[in-house]
Amino acid sequence: MANLAKLEFAALDLSGDNFLSWVLDAKIHLRANGLGQTIVDENNASPEENAKAMIFLRRHIHEALKSEYVVVDEPLVLWKALGERYDHQKTMTLPRARYEWTHLRFQDYKSVSEYNSAMHRITSLMRLCGENISEEDMLEKTLSTFHASNVLLQQQYRHSSFKKYSELVSCLLLAEQNNELLLKNHQSRPTGSAPLPEINAASQEVNATSSREGLGPRSGPSTNGKNASRNKGKAQMSHVPRNVDSPCHRCGAKGHWVRTCRTPRHLADLYQASLKNRKVEINYIDHAPPAKDGSSEISRQLNKTHLDVSDFVTKRGNEGYESELD
């Protein structure tokens, strides 16, 4: 059955592989909650404090361990029992940590960060097992395991006389970053070649020039904010292609649009009137009644005479001309 409450750190495993880190975490949290004295010999902890410490310890151990130590109700007794059971982890971890420390080399890692992580992991295990690693040991381990091609660089770092391992790592990280930037700049283009022009900047300049040319004399700067925004909108829409072959809706001529039409008004009115007459004629044809009795109806429709104003005007003109001749 899993613990219902959220754990502050990983519970002690049944195999005891995480016993060293579990002991450290348990001590820190017990002290933070004011229960650190409950796991010390000859303490003066109250029954309530012992109960709280017992609840905390049992929540952070494996379920099988809870069953094995179900009769233990004192935190100090449980603490000592777990220590006797898993104390051999120190003797097992220390030889492995020493082996990793002996074979740790700076040249075997691809980056400074990876080496730094391995260094802190190994030294932490050795310190948990009771073996101390000083700053001088860490500095000497790093400087003595440089690659053979970096002999001069290693000597320069030695002459810097670093007192702490963290200072050396900071310099190594900075040098690594500078080397990466140097390689990127070198590989960006061939040596001696000029940088390529920026495509975005060139296209923006061309668009701006064409926009100003399309606007004509009104493309200059305006002091009014509304005019500035209006000109800006025209500049953005100037590149939209338009069909200049279509007839003007005002006069019917081609080659210009309605907004730029300069045709006299009386000619435009005549064109608009012709459009209206054309629509009336079309409607008259569309609403003609269908034929009912075949050819007789068709002949009757053909015999009808359509009246038009022009017919009367021409006729009256001809009558006047004939009267003069007479």
Image: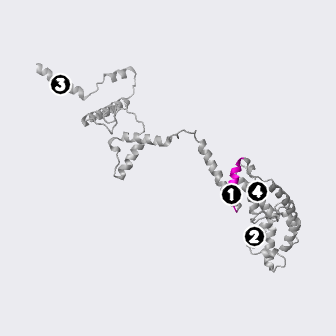
Nearer mark to the viewer, of 4 and 3: 4
Q: What is the CA distance from the residue labelled 2 to the residue labelled 4?
A: 34 Å
Q: Are marks 1 and 2 in contact (CB under 8 Å)?
A: no
Residue 304 left/right relative to 32:
left
Q: Residue 50 at x, y = what percent?
A: 81, 76
Q: Residue 106 at x, y = what percent?
A: 74, 52
- Give the number of the disc on residue 29: 2
Q: Amino acid at mark 3?
A: Gly
What residue is disc 1 on?
159
Residue 215 left/right relative to 82:
left
What residue is disc 3 on?
317
Looking at the image, residue 294 lies above or below residue 115: above
Residue 19 occupies which quadrant of the picture?
A: bottom right
Looking at the image, residue 254 lies above or below residue 22: above
- Is any part of residue 118 visible from this angle? no
Q: Residue at x 75, y 59 (%)?
A: 138
Q: Earlier in the sequence, mark 3 or mark 2?
A: 2
Query: Is 301 a magenta residue?
Result: no
- Is any part of residue 219 visible from this angle? yes
Residue 134 occupies which quadrant of the picture?
A: bottom right
Q: Which residues are magenta?
A: 149-163
Residue 38 occupies which quadrant of the picture?
A: bottom right
Nearer mark to the viewer, of 3 and 1: 1
- Give the number of the disc on residue 141: 4
Q: Amino acid at mark 4?
A: Lys
Q: Amino acid at mark 2?
A: His
Q: Nearer the viewer, residue 57 or 123?
A: 123
Q: What is the CA distance from the residue labelled 1 to the residue labelled 2?
A: 44 Å
Q: What is the CA distance from the residue labelled 3 to the residue labelled 2?
A: 120 Å
Looking at the image, residue 4 lies above or below residue 323: below
Q: Earlier in the sequence, mark 4 or mark 3?
A: 4
